[in-house]
Amino acid sequence: MFVTAERTGLGDIETFARPFVPFNRGRGIYCRETPIAKIHTMDIPSEPRLRTVIVDDEERSRNTLQSLLATYCPEVAVLAQADSADSAEQLLATERPDVLFLDIQMPGGSGFELLERIRDRDFPVVFVTAHDKYAIRAIRASAIDYLLKPLDIDELRETVRKLVRLRKERFASPPSPKSTAKVCARSSGAFAKIRSRPELSSRRATAASWRN
């Protein structure tokens, strides 16, 4: 038995286990390859993973995001979860993550209110919400990205790739007003793409079950 691997565009490895299956072809016994299994694996990150905190008032949403990150984004390690702005504020006082995945509408305080309470925030924020109407406000809050529920795996992976690139840029050179402006410009472009997606209207109905 031997194994061949084909790399896809998203960094996955699709592996096929092929045993030799004998068959009679006139004179002698020949062998042919027969695929019997397809194993889906992920690339192992060569750099330290992005330490992440998830803040969402719905346990199902938190666990879904954590599961998707664990399955499709090996660059990310979830440190902890918080179910409200108050509990998140206490958590972030002791844990300094590399990135914060943040819901917007939560009882006792919105995601925007949480960010206003955090002084000297030195980590990027990705909003994860069922509502598309807060995109402009998210840009003003200097968010890196804005993901809509139910989450699209490709969009989530692209966001993580963006976060990895930003971390590399951050450690490659000290931050400057010009680099900060570039980050905001990239974020604005990403949000505009989200708002203009043709499938957005159809996903709003599906998102009803995810309402905060």
Image (cartoon, rainbow, N blue to C red):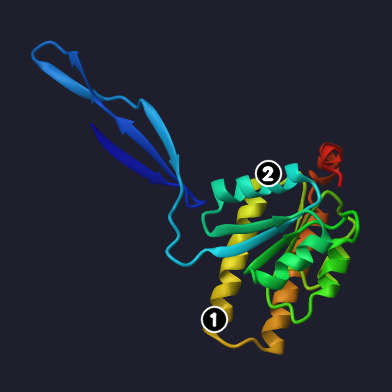
Which residue is at a point 31% across and 40% down the rendered structure image? 4
Instruction: Say what amino acid the circle numbered 2 marks.
Output: Thr
Foreground residue, 161 or 200?
161
Distance between the alpha carbons at the discs numbered 2 and 1: 31 Å
Q: Which of marks 2 and 1 is nearer the N terminus?
A: 2
Query: 31 or 57, which is in the foreground?
Result: 57
Give the side of residue 105 with respect to residue 49, left or right: right
Query: Does residue 70 sit above or below 55 in this rendering?
Result: above
Q: Nearer the viewer, residue 13 or 59?
A: 59
Picture residue at 38% right of the left edge, 29% below the top: 37
Occupied quadrant, residue 31: top left
Q: Quick one: 134 or 118, which is closer to the camera?
A: 118
Which circle marks residue 66 in the picture? Answer: none
At a point 60% along the width and 73% down the height, the residue shown is 166
Please rate how many residues cluster around mark 2, counting C-alpha atoms within 10 Å: few if below 14, some from 14 to 19, many from 20: few
Q: Residue 171 carries which label?
A: 1
Q: Nearer the viewer, mark 2 or mark 1?
A: 2
Q: Could you tell me residue 205's position as x and y percent? A: 86, 37
Give the percent coordinates (x, y) of residue 180: 71, 82
Question: Circle 2 sits in a helix, a strand or a loop, which is it?
Answer: helix
Q: Which amino acid does label 1 sit on?
A: Phe
Write down the quadrant of residue 161 in the picture: bottom right
Question: In this picture, is 193 found above or below 34?
Answer: below
Image spot of residue 192 (x, y percent):
80, 62
Could you say which disc has been placed on residue 64 in the image?
Answer: 2
Q: Is residue 168 above or below residue 109?
A: below
